[in-house]
Amino acid sequence: MLHNFLKIALRQIVKNKIYSITNITGLTLGITFALLVFMVVKFETSYDGYHKNRDCIYRVNTGKPGNVLGKGSQTGLMPALIDEFPEIKKVAVARILHSRVGTQLEVNGNLSLEKNAFFVTPSFYEMFDATWIAGSPATSLANPGQVVITESLANKYFDGQAIDNMIKIDNEYEVIVSGIIKDPPLNTDFPIKIAISHATFEQSKHFEAGDFNSTYSGYQTYVMLGPENTPEALEAKFPAMITKYLGKEANQRFAYALQPLRDIHFNIAIGNFNRRTTSRLTLLIMALIGVLILCIASFNFINLSTAQAINRATEVGVRKVMGSTRSLLMKQFFSETFTFVMAAAGLSLLALSILIPKLIDIIHLPGNALQLYFPDMLLVLAMIVVLLTFLSGLYPALIMANLRPISTLKKKVGKTTLKAGSLRRGLVLFQFTVTMIMIISTVVVLFQTHYVLRKPLGFNKEAVIALDLPPHAPKVEAALRNNLLSHSSIRDISFSLNTPSATYNREFVHYGHITFEEGIMAELKSIDTNYLAMFDIQILAGRNLKASDPNSAILINETLMKQIGFNDPNEVLGESIEFIGIKGEIVGVVQNFHSLSLKTAIYPLIFFRDQSWFHKASIKIDMAQLASILSLIKQQWHDFFPKTFFQYKFLDEDIASFYRQEIKTSRLLSLLAGVAIFIACLGLFGLAAYDAVQRTKEIGIRKVMGASVHAILFLLSKNYLKLILVAFLIAIPVTNYLVSEWLQEFAYKIDLNLWIFVAPGLFVAVTAWLAILGQSFQAAVKNPSETLKYE
């Protein structure tokens, strides 16, 4: 019996080629991109899910009461947590060696750069899971001068025999390899490749034991609680600890909060070591889009199958007269649907194997995603096949099986399929409502992404390369500057803590009348006298810093000026602000500029000059002579710093990396929206072809009665265009709500004007009309003598 069903199904596929190709194409696209969305969502939601203690781990964040958005902590926090809270099972610290270009390694006299080097306590790997090839957390990270590296680095530098070999890191830390771990998976926000013992950091000049004043975003503290303890109970005890170590009044300006490990990847406001977050709302929207694309493909099948009912009515009548039962007919039509869906499923797997390698940069999946998720994907694919077979096959099977033999054999099935026509209109309305929502949402995402990439930042980022300075750079700063500026292709050079687009050093500052309740945290940037001019940062009042100024001479930005109670830049000049033990005098006010992505409001800022804080060299160059300039700078670099690896990064590329996730989201949404409109129009094309065939005689009679081609085209397309108009009216309020919620992630965003909704709506309407036009035009220009010759 099953063999006969499948044979009949294959015959129908071959017999109705256009119908079959349309259905299989729509289902293939629907399944392919639904599976693609599944893999993206699964990958993003799997971050750090492999740690067995994942539900008990929390990061201790810092900030002001009610606004704890700082991921960094102080060096004094870890010992205080251990001493004060016995209910905490483990406390761990990870401190990144902060560099945008990488950490320098010297192995056997050879220099190289590697990213993701951290100082970690032994408890870190007791809390977070890693596969140890050699060594253990207790023995490999307990003492100064120890380092654990990944298997790939051990193979790269030591042919796998890395234990007891020495590595010099950043020309400062001489460490011995004491352990080897497997490379961390891609789905982690702790991509540690080099783990240096925290004891090594404790012996360096950069470490200040027991400090509670300096908070560094790259120094993060984690705690692991027992199952009997709750984060809320521990947070309630933090004020007492703050009182003990910082004084009672400190609770008015300072607070700690616990952030669950499972939240770190999804919290855009706070961030993580991986510098990559994804909002849950974005993932929810993607998952919804995947489901809706499947629905659109399924509804296409239903529409075209019910439209074909009249062509197969005689077949059904004959089968019923010959003794076929309603259940057998339903099984037959379900088997046909199953055949279509299985063919589409097979083509989907083939399409995914081709598409994933080409879409890696867009969808941010690992290169081996298809193999990695294959077992899960097969299960999801099986569920999709069953669901699509049931949903797509049920209604057409019911329509066909319920046809009355006497009506079918007399070719009187018009009334029988009347309800199917109403359903088709409802499904077309749903398809185009969803498509409109997707297209308009994609346009908003594209506009917002374009806005954040093009909005003036308040400083000039063009033609600037940034290099990390070695620790002894201030001693040769003047000579390096003079040598480089002697070449006309180098326009300017500045030394500083970091570029305008970097921020990772925030401290509490105090101003005369500001109470503890109004405590302010500001970004500190140490700069030289060239910094403002080179980056075109405008001074609103006062003057620039001078070489002769002490480090107490400071510049502040407009945000900090307003937070300490001034609106006129000239009035704040000469006022004093205290920070990190320095009583600073305000000598100038600079215009606000964006040092973070436009998701974040502009932060209070203090510029001061301290050469010991200079970690970055920024060089403005003539881009027309890029190759020769880079060669020149590299030579000069090696002359001054022979043991420092030369590595640079363009400032504008660094800024663009802030929006890497938005760019990828916009590309993926554009792709999915394109697929949705293609599937919807594919179905519309099939329905238009069906309508044209069913109304062939009507069109012939109308032409004989004098109807023009334009009138016929309008007749065939008006009902569909009405449905598209209704879909547009439904889509506007729904889309407005969705995109408004998404835009809340940005402190600076586009305005939603009417054309953002109207233009995509017109695009969808025109695209749909063109899909209808091809079939309608053929029917409209056909000679009536051919259509009416048998009447």
Image (cartoon, grey):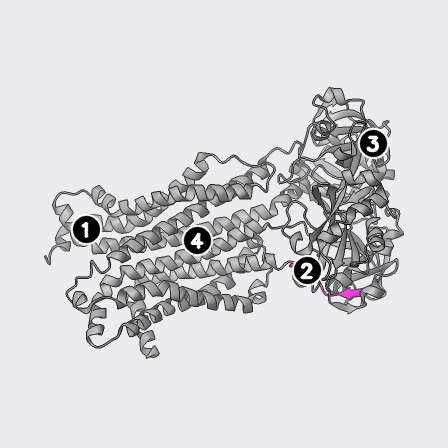
Q: Are marks 3 and 2 in contact (CB under 8 Å)?
A: no
Please count the marks in the image.
Answer: 4
Closer mark to the observer between disc 1 and disc 3? 3
- The image's mark for residue 578 is 3
- Where does the N terminus fall, quadrant-wise? bottom left
Closer to the N terminus: mark 4 or mark 1?
4
Q: Looking at numbered disc 3 in the image, what kind of residue is underneath it?
A: Glu
Q: CA distance from mark 1 to mark 3?
A: 87 Å
Closer to the N terminus: mark 4 or mark 2?
2
- The image's mark for residue 782 is 1
Closer to the N terminus: mark 3 or mark 2?
2
Assess disc 2: are there few (<14), some (14-19) or many (≥20) residues with their C-alpha within 10 Å of its C-alpha.
some
Choose between 446 and 279: the one closer to the eye: 279
Q: Quadrant of residue 747?
A: top right
Closer to the N terminus: mark 2 or mark 1?
2
Q: CA distance from mark 2 to mark 1?
A: 69 Å
Assess disc 1: are there few (<14), some (14-19) or many (≥20) residues with their C-alpha within 10 Å of its C-alpha.
some
Q: Give the extent of the magenta segment.
A: 176-189
| Residue bearing the label numbered 2 | 55
Closer mark to the observer between disc 4 and disc 2? 2
Specify whether residue 22 is in view: no
